[in-house]
Amino acid sequence: ETIPQMLAAAVRDHGDREALVFPEHGLRLTYAEFSDAVDRLATGLLDLGISRGDRVGIWAPNRPEWVLTQFATARIGAILVNVNPAYRVGELEYALRHVGVRCLILADSFKTSNYVNMIQHVAPELAFCAPGALMAPNLPDLRIVVRMGASRSTSGILNFADLAGTPADPARLDAITQTLKADDAINIQFTSGTTGLPKGATLSHRNIVNNGHFVTATIAFTQEDRLCVPVPLYHCFGMVMGVLGCVSKGATMVFPGEGFDPDVVLNAVADERCTGLYGVPTMFSAMLDSQNFLAHDLSSLRTGIMAGAPCPIEVMRRVIDQMHMREVTIAYGMTETSPVSFQSHTDDPLEKRVTTVGRVHPHLEVKLVDEAGHTVPVGATGELCTRGYSVMKGYWGEPAKTAEAVDADGWMHTGDLATLDAEGYCNIVGRLKDMLIRGGENIYPREIEEYLFQHPAVQLAQVFGVPDPKFGEEVCAWVVLKPGASATEDEIRDFIRTRVAHYKVPRHIRFRAELPMTVTGKAQKFLMRKAMIEELG
Ligand code: ATP
Ligand code: MG
């Protein structure tokens, strides 16, 4: 199935049901209205000369135009490029050049970034350009820039509202849509950049349509469900698990705001009577610790997904007990695998649901291997490898990097360490890159983080290794305390000492107001490590 076929099926079966709600924009569209809007925008893109296989970048936080663009590009077979909303000038220029973006659709601004200034910096000729003309010598493919939210157009930049108001030409669109193949590249998604530079994973209709379907099937979603999506659309969690997952069931998507604010999200859940909620673990912690938590009526919630990073057991328990999310599941995945490959089921035993990432998704194969590439015995730790429909086509324009990640037999080497029990439940031990070796002992930061989370004053904790002359590496922890809470380094250390072997007790503990995070809500340990190395000299 292709993405346009998926939307057509939703219109046929659920046309009058609400598809999209953006409370801040006062926007509500049924599936039929949404599909009409997609056709207008798709016709507008065709009129601009965008055709099948062209790369169309979208650089914006969660806004209605994002979802429209996602389906309008797919309708004409153009490849959507998710541009990270946190990018600055240098990263933007690199991404646009690397994948040869022909048309860039951008928001005015997000947080402290002014996107219009940044694009004018990257493409100084922009102001003098007619649409379709070369805009910058270093960006030979970039011909069109479209700005959303603007009341009037700036020179060289087209207006999204004008484009989206083009009279639709369904016959012309259908003729193109019919030629699309499920294996066509349709989306380039950048990884989060948790361990270094983001990588552009090229994904097909088959990859993401199917994964979206299986993700929401696992939480038993139907057309009656209403999902609150505070995770970025830029990332597969938002656009595949959220948007495609909902469209496959005719469910409603509710987008609470452009950036993440715990109270805005909880408000949206209550006002819109959402039945499902997605989030990375840090988002759920922030919601639970919000001063106004008890004021929100969350009784409509039933299920949801926590994913994207290790899900602390404490946080899972509180989500189930305090947020009414009795049927919440954990999912594990990565951008390169569309993304999900493991997910717990709503009817798994509670203990498994809280402590593991569940079992492998349908139609996927899995194995754990040691350094020599041999499969490890049940219960032992190895690198997680997955194979099947969900594995990406490759990293755009980087065959060597692709070959490193996906071997000749089609196995995706995830770079994550895991264990599998006899029933197939998987436990993510941590990233291969994050494991540290102190005095010859392997240490997995995740284990220590779990104990830190049990400390009543701790809101967030990250553990990583720093070089040490005596032991090779030493354990270091960065801790964010709960609002109003206090604790000393020694108190934290004593708390950990009674729970783990002495060599795992963090030697260096630092309290921070916040941690370096990706826009997808993941702590960037490589930046913490760098800062600590500088501090320790
Ligand atoms: P980069 O590859 O650029 O360093 P990234 O790996 O964080 O960034 P993503 O593709 O967004 O980019 O994230 C995938 C990774 O997130 C997985 O490889 C895994 O390490 C982690 N992850 C995802 N879900 C879970 C989970 N439920 N439990 C533990 N880790 C998870
Ligand atoms: Mg990765």
Image: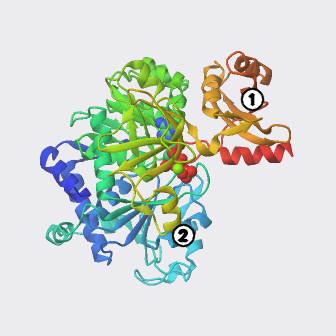
Nearer the camera: disc 2 or disc 1:
1
- Determine the residue positioned at 18% across, 51% down: 32
Q: Is residue 500 left or right of residue 244?
A: right
Looking at the picture, does residue 223 appear above or below residue 99?
A: above
Can you tell me whether the CB of the residue at mark 1 lies under 8 Å from the nearest atom of ligand 1?
no
Q: Name the residue under label 2.
A: 119
The image quadrant of residue 454 is top right
Residue 69's x, y, as percent? 34, 60
In this rendered view, identify the residue nearer to me: 433 or 481: 433
Can you tell me whether the CB of the residue at mark 2 lies under 8 Å from the nearest atom of ligand 1?
no
Q: Give the alpha-carbon distance from disc 2 to disc 1, as whole Å.
A: 44 Å
Residue 21 visible within the image: no
Q: Mark 1 points at which residue?
A: 506
- Identify the amino acid type marked 1: Pro
Looking at the picture, does residue 425 appear above or below residue 44?
A: above
- Determine the residue positioned at 56% across, 68% down: 94
- Determine the residue positioned at 32% across, 24% down: 300
